[in-house]
Image (tube, rainbow, N blue to C red):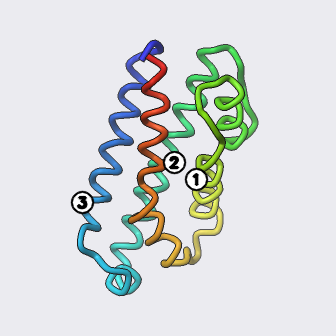
Amino acid sequence: MRYNGVIQRKLALLNKQLFKLEEYLKGVGYAEFSESWAHRALSERALQVSVEIIIDIAERIISLEGKGPVSSASEAIECLVSMGFLKSTDPYVNMVRFRNVIVHQYEEIDPAILYTLATTKLSDFRRFIDEISELE
């Protein structure tokens, strides 16, 4: 990465989060997941941290490029797209929206949505890793 070790460390941490979540949920079906407070809570936290890492990386790149500050996490994603660092705002803006739901409407997260994200959408996070890693 042409920027600095902080971004590399954050990408490595993101990769570790995804790997651990994947390993933790391996073989866990929806019925078991929806009944388990631990499965749901761990998944919420892992996904929230993963999105926070994406936001941190976006804001750091924007700062290093002298393009900030931005007023929101969604704007940070949009800025990376306009700067050519990401190909599209999809699915990243939706990740930020989901993180906002976890943080601000935390009373009850729909287990079906959470399970889908935790078991079928981790490739979206890996796509971010790949796109940012291409900046080298």
Depth check, front residue: 130 or 49: 130
Q: Amino acid at mark 1?
A: Met
Q: Amino acid at mark 2?
A: Val
Report if the CB atoms under discs 1 and 2 are less than 8 Å apart: yes
**Label 2 element class:** helix
Is 127 on the left-hand or right-hand side of 89?
A: left
Q: Label 3: which residue?
A: 23
Label 3 vs label 2: CA separation? 19 Å
- In the displayed structure, would residue 92 be above or below residue 103? above
Q: Residues within 10 Å of mark 1 (few under 14, many from 20)?
A: many
Depth check, front residue: 71 or 120: 120
Report if the CB atoms under discs 3 and 2 are less than 8 Å apart: no
Q: Which mark is residue 51?
A: 2
Q: Residue at x 68, y 14 (%)?
A: 66
Q: Label 1: which residue?
A: 95
Q: Residue at x 59, y 32 (%)?
A: 86
